[in-house]
């Protein structure tokens, strides 16, 4: 369901952005991208939101933002913006080093804001995220996190295939991503955890021949094997010789079929075991070389996320991506880092919701 088309949504919610960098604002000028990526553009185009303000320490960023959105106010102090503006939905698009501090400030001083839209990964430290979870629950604030794959149609198609067991149980999931685990491959890791939530052990090898630097800090790639309590396994490749060699591909191995989700094509490919195909001889049921397809159209994931936040404010919809799965991603990355450091040790883990 494309929830941004729900007719009940008529109220205009006031939105603002902290951080007018790439994902907050400037990426909308990249005309080669064929969908909405920037928070600013999404708020300006959604039928239920008004973009009223943005804040950034850069004077140039504020100036460019106000030229693009003259109806909105621009502030070099986000604290000043929060004092002066009445905000319903607040986006936080800042580096992970300061995101927790900004969240703490908002939750402590501006309790009228009940919905926050954060860029991932929020923090490198899972314990700091856990404290934010506790504070947000205490204050009654919902925190949506932009793991945008969860608003894509193929994500829900794959989730339905797992739940229905149409092709038997899911046994192995392979994720082929790109170097910089936190920056680029955390999206594919989030999907892998969602499809296989009961991860028990992690074994990781850090990429050594190339280490990407993001905002001046090393963010290496990894090759990771994870085992799960439900007798399934996960393999993640988040390596490449450079960040330009981008990849997002999921291979799901069910008992009776292989399912393929790839960026750049508007279909899910399904390769079933077929007794009718004789290419390895009689008496076998090999994987078909002729895939069946589930076609879909691309969605505007940013608009879908905003629609969910609006519906959440009105008590109708649970967020598809929130601070809880963001915690799970960061906790898993911590274990990936630890395993790579020790090289030959696997580490068990528990879900935040387990008692």
Image (spheres, helix red, strand yellow):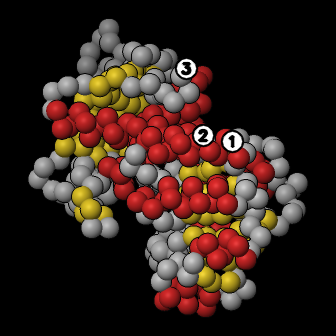
State the residue in front, 19 or 170.
19
- In terms of secondary structure, where does tag 2 sit? helix
Q: Do labels 2 and 1 touch, CB within 8 Å?
A: yes
Residue 149 in the figure: left or right of residue 273 = right
Image quadrant containing the C terminus: top right
Location of residue 332 with respect to 211 vertically, above or below: above
Q: Which residue is mark 1?
A: 138
Residue 248 in the figure: left or right of residue 341 = right
- In terms of secondary structure, where does tag 3 sit? loop
Q: Quadrant of residue 329?
A: top left
Q: Give the image location of residue 103, x and y in percent.
A: 57, 57
Residue at image point 63% right, 60% down: 106
Say few, some or many: other residues with alpha carbon within 10 Å of mark 1 (under 14 / 14 to 19 / 20 or more). Answer: few
Q: Which residue is mark 3?
A: 355
State the residue in front, 315 or 239.
315
Location of residue 65 with respect to 85 vertically, above or below: below
Q: Give the image location of residue 316, x and y in percent.
A: 80, 43
């Amino acid at each position: 369901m494309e929830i941004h088309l729900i007719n009940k949504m008529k109220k205009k919610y006031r939105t603002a952005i902290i951080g007018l960098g790439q994902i907050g604002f400037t990426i909308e000028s990249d005309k080669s991208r064929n969908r909405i990526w920037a928070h600013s553009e999404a708020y300006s185009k959604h039928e239920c939101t008004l973009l009223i303000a943005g804040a950034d320490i850069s004077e140039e960023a504020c100036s460019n933002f106000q030229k693009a959105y003259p109806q909105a106010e621009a502030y070099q102090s986000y604290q000043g913006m929060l004092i002066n503006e009445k905000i319903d939905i607040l986006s936080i698009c800042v580096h992970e080093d300061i995101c927790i501090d900004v969240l703490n400030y908002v939750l402590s001083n501006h309790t009228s804001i009940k919905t926050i839209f954060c860029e991932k990964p929020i923090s490198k430290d899972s314990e700091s995220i856990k404290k934010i979870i506790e504070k947000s629950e205490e204050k009654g604030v919902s925190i949506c996190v932009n793991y945008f794959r969860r608003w894509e149609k193929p994500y829900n198609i794959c989730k339905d295939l797992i739940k229905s067991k149409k092709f038997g149980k899911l046994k192995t999931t392979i994720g082929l991503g790109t170097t910089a685990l936190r920056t680029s491959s955390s999206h594919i890791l989030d999907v892998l955890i969602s499809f296989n939530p009961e991860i028990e052990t992690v074994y990781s090898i850090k990429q050594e021949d190339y280490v990407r630097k993001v905002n001046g800090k090393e963010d290496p790639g990894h090759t990771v094997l994870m085992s799960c309590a439900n007798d399934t396994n996960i393999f993640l490749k988040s390596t490449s010789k450079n960040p330009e060699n981008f990849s997002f591909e999921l291979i799901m191995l069910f008992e009776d079929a292989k399912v393929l989700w790839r960026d750049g094509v508007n279909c899910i490919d399904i390769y079933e075991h077929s007794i009718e195909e004789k290419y390895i001889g009689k008496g076998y049921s090999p994987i078909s070389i002729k895939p069946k397809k589930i076609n879909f159209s691309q969605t505007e994931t940013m608009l879908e996320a905003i629609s969910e936040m609006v519906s959440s404010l009105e008590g109708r919809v649970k967020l598809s991506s929130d601070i809880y799965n963001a915690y799970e991603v960061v906790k898993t990355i911590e274990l990936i880092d630890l395993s790579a450091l020790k090289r030959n040790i696997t580490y068990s883990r528990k879900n935040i919701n387990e008692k």
